[in-house]
């Protein structure tokens, strides 16, 4: 799931990247580097990010279902085809 994907966010002051997840960025009001530099997130931006992550999750589920239906249809197509052998 996208929410648990590990990412590295650049330090606001150019130091070592901050290791976090997309889910943490969407939930926490701020993100602090090891040197104390900080990102303060706006709620409206976090809300947009949460909606986008939810939409991606829905699309992934739809894609998985569509792939399953496609492969079932493909298998049925081959299984139900008339076979003509030339001699």
Image: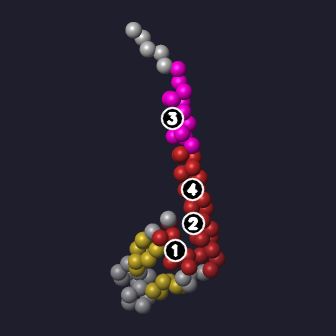
| Magenta stretch, residue numbers | 69-82
| Marks 2 and 1 in Cβ contact (< 8 Å) | yes
| Marks 3 and 4 in Cβ contact (< 8 Å) | no
Q: Earlier in the sequence, mark 3 or mark 1?
A: 1
Residue 30 within the magenta-colored segment of the rendering: no
Alpha carbon separation for disc pair 3 and 1? 38 Å
> Toward the viewer: 64 or 14?
64
- The quadrant in which the C terminus is found is top left
The answer to which quarter of the image holds residue 28 is bottom right
Alpha carbon separation for disc pair 2 and 4? 12 Å
Q: Hey, which residue is sitting farthest bottom in the picture?
A: 36
Task: Label 4: state its secondary structure.
Answer: helix
Task: Label 3: state its secondary structure.
Answer: helix
Alpha carbon separation for disc pair 2 and 3? 33 Å
Reading the image, the residue beneath label 3 is 75
Q: Earlier in the sequence, mark 2 or mark 1?
A: 1
Q: Which mark is residue 23?
A: 1
Reading the image, the residue beneath label 4 is 61
Q: Position of residue 24 (x, y in %)?
A: 50, 78
Q: Residue at x 57, y 56 (%)?
A: 61
* CA neighbours of label 1 inside 10 A, class few (<14), some (14 to 19), many (20+): some
Q: Which of marks 2 and 4 is nearer the N terminus?
A: 2
The mark closer to the camera, 1 or 4, is: 4
């Amino acid at each position: 799931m996208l929410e648990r994907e590990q990412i590295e966010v650049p330090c606001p002051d150019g130091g070592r990247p901050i290791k976090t997840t997309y889910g943490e960025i969407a939930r926490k009001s701020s993100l602090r580097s090891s040197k104390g530099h900080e990102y303060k997130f706006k709620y409206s931006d976090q809300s947009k990010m949460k909606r986008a992550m939810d939409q991606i999750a829905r699309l992934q589920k739809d894609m998985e279902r569509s792939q399953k239906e496609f492969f079932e249809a493909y298998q049925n197509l081959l299984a139900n085809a008339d076979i003509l052998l030339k001699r």
